[in-house]
Amino acid sequence: MDLTNKVAIVTGGAAGIGRSISLELAKRGVQVVLNYNRSEKAAEELVAEIQSFGGHAFAVQADISKYEDAQKLVNQTIERFGTLNIVVNNAGITDDALILRMQEEQFDRVISTNLKGVWNVCKHAAKPMMKSGYGRIINISSVSGVMGNAGQSNYSASKAGVIGLTKALAREFSARGVTVNAIAPGFIETEMTKKLSAEIVDQWRGQIPLKRFGDAREVAYAVAFLASDEASYITGHTLEVDGGLVM
């Protein structure tokens, strides 16, 4: 899967799963535009790490829930590299609560980032990708968007929306050489899952056929495949990287 000299935007690319995606793409020769919102230090450290092994990366601050920020992110990528080949919409947030306790602001904030943010980036990336006749868009959804999860009505709705958006755009972009796919990670070992209690971890692990949480690199490998020419006949698909949790 040779991705040498491809140009990619990875939203939320400085931490967690996004960090692993940025690293994996850079190791495969991709010039990575690492988007962050508040994690400036983490973004700068990751850029330095990528450059240390001869990779190419630079960081762009943008709140992708804002239409103009998403446009800035795409524009700066084109200005820097002259093209855009791959978009990985990874940025996302959680703000959990049962619906009886959830405030409207909690719902709106999660939808704005996790769903509207993906639409914003795709909107601005569409024209240069379709004009070039080549593109790979990979949207990071979640198994919560496939099966639902109590206490996450906002998050589950946003991630289910990402899957629907992926299928719609796959149909819109297919004639212009741009594929659009989604990845739905299950429980992946990140700083977020480290905050779960041992009881909850054991409960969920027992429901996973492979009996373990995933490694963020396993999601990154799936992204690299969908970004490659080897995946040229796959579009509109949701790949669950979840150890068999929702099969």
Image (spheres, grey):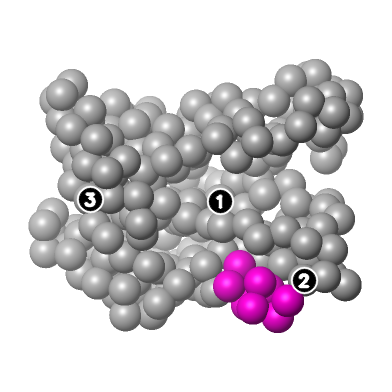
Residue 217 appears at what percent x and percent y? Answer: 50, 27
Q: Is residue 22 magenta?
A: no
**Residue 80 showing in the rendered view:** yes
The amino acid beneath tag 3 is: Ala
Q: Secondary structure at mark 1?
A: strand
Q: Looking at the image, is mark 1 or mark 2 earlier in the sequence?
A: 2
User: Which span of residues is magenta-colored?
Assistant: 103-111
Q: Secondary structure at mark 3?
A: strand
Which numbered disc, 1 or 2, marks the residue closer to the eye?
Answer: 2
Which numbered disc, 3 or 2, marks the residue closer to the eye?
Answer: 2
Q: What residue is disc 1 on?
A: 140
Q: Of 171 and 243, which appears nearest the observer? A: 243
Marks 1 and 3 sit apart, C-alpha to C-alpha, by: 20 Å
Q: Quadrant of residue 23?
A: top left
Vertical comparison of 178 with 131: above or below: above
Residue 62 appears at what percent x and percent y? Answer: 31, 65
The structure residue drawn at horizontal position 41% and vertical position 51%, both measured from the top left corner, is 12
The amino acid beneath tag 1 is: Ile
Q: Quadrant of the C terminus?
A: top right
CB contact under 8 Å: marks 3 and 2: no
Q: Quadrant of residue 218?
A: top right
Q: Quadrant of the N terminus?
A: top left
Which numbered disc, 1 or 3, marks the residue closer to the eye?
Answer: 3
How packed is label 1: few (under 14 Cα within 10 Å), some, or many (20 or more)?
many
Q: What residue is disc 3 on?
A: 59
The structure residue drawn at horizontal position 75% and vertical position 51%, both measured from the top left corner, is 144
Residue 102 - label = 2
